[in-house]
Amino acid sequence: MKKEKFFEVLGEIDDEKIKAAENAPNNLSSNKKRLAIGLCAAACIGLVIGAGIWLGKSQDITADSTGEQSESNDDSEDVLALECADVDIYYVDGNEIKSVTEYLPLSAEEIFDRWKAHNNIGTEVRLIDVRLDDNGTDSADSFVAYHTAGDHFTLNITISKSIENYYDTLPEEDLLESLKLTMTGYSDIEIDEYNLVLE
């Protein structure tokens, strides 16, 4: 069936209107169509890039709830927020050992850094290792290893030997005593022995 016959059957449409519709110019030229397609493609690409950036930033924020950016998202300790408490930081003032209380995360590294700051000790002095040993017993079954805590605790701390560079300006005995008081005092565990190793 021809167009004219179809429209005549539907309702007697004028021939002039049919011919005008057939010859009507297309509103969008081919250049305009390409521009519209290009703009749509650019908008889609922008959305994909923006979503990628947003997801990347949201992972960085959730990867570390302690306020510091972590180097790696694999470290599960970075995801957990550390408990904070009032901590006494001891420092040498002349020939006296004094203390200041700060609200800090209960992290040996953080507390050691604050001790260094109060004693004007530079970044070359590092906390290498902190280990708490006790006289408890170890046992294991076929699936799980157990440790029953003892009643005698030893705190072993290893720091860099560069601390010796500060013995000229701060009395060695007082400086090391202030470190001992700081590092043994922030835990609820009563420390029976304290060992400091310089490496």
Image: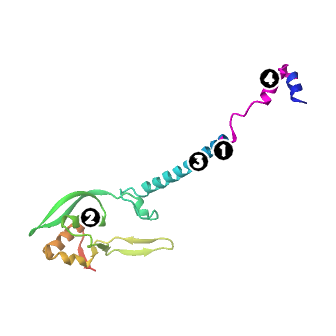
> Of helix, strand and loop, which one carries label 4?
helix
Q: Amino acid at mark 4?
A: Lys
Q: Gap in Å between the C-alphas at discs 3 and 2?
A: 51 Å
Q: Amino acid at mark 3?
A: Ala
Disc nearer the start of the sequence (3/2):
3
Q: Which residue is mark 2?
A: 111
Disc nearer the start of the sequence (1/3):
1
The answer to if 83 sits in the magenta stretch is no
Which mark is nearer the camera, 1 or 3? Answer: 1
What range of the chain is rendered magenta?
9-31
Cβ–Cβ under 8 Å for marks 1 and 2: no
Q: Gap in Å between the C-alphas at discs 3 and 4?
A: 40 Å
Q: Which residue is mark 3?
A: 42
> Of helix, strand and loop, which one carries label 1?
helix
User: Furthest-left residue in view?
Assistant: 95
> Of helix, strand and loop, which one carries label 2?
helix
Disc nearer the start of the sequence (1/2):
1
Q: Which residue is mark 1?
A: 34
Which part of the image, by quadrant, shows the C terminus? bottom left
Which mark is nearer the camera, 2 or 4? Answer: 4
Q: Which residue is mark 4?
A: 17
Cβ–Cβ under 8 Å for marks 3 and 2: no
Q: Gap in Å between the C-alphas at discs 4 and 1?
A: 30 Å
Q: Amino acid at mark 1?
A: Arg
Disc nearer the start of the sequence (3/4):
4
Cβ–Cβ under 8 Å for marks 1 and 3: no
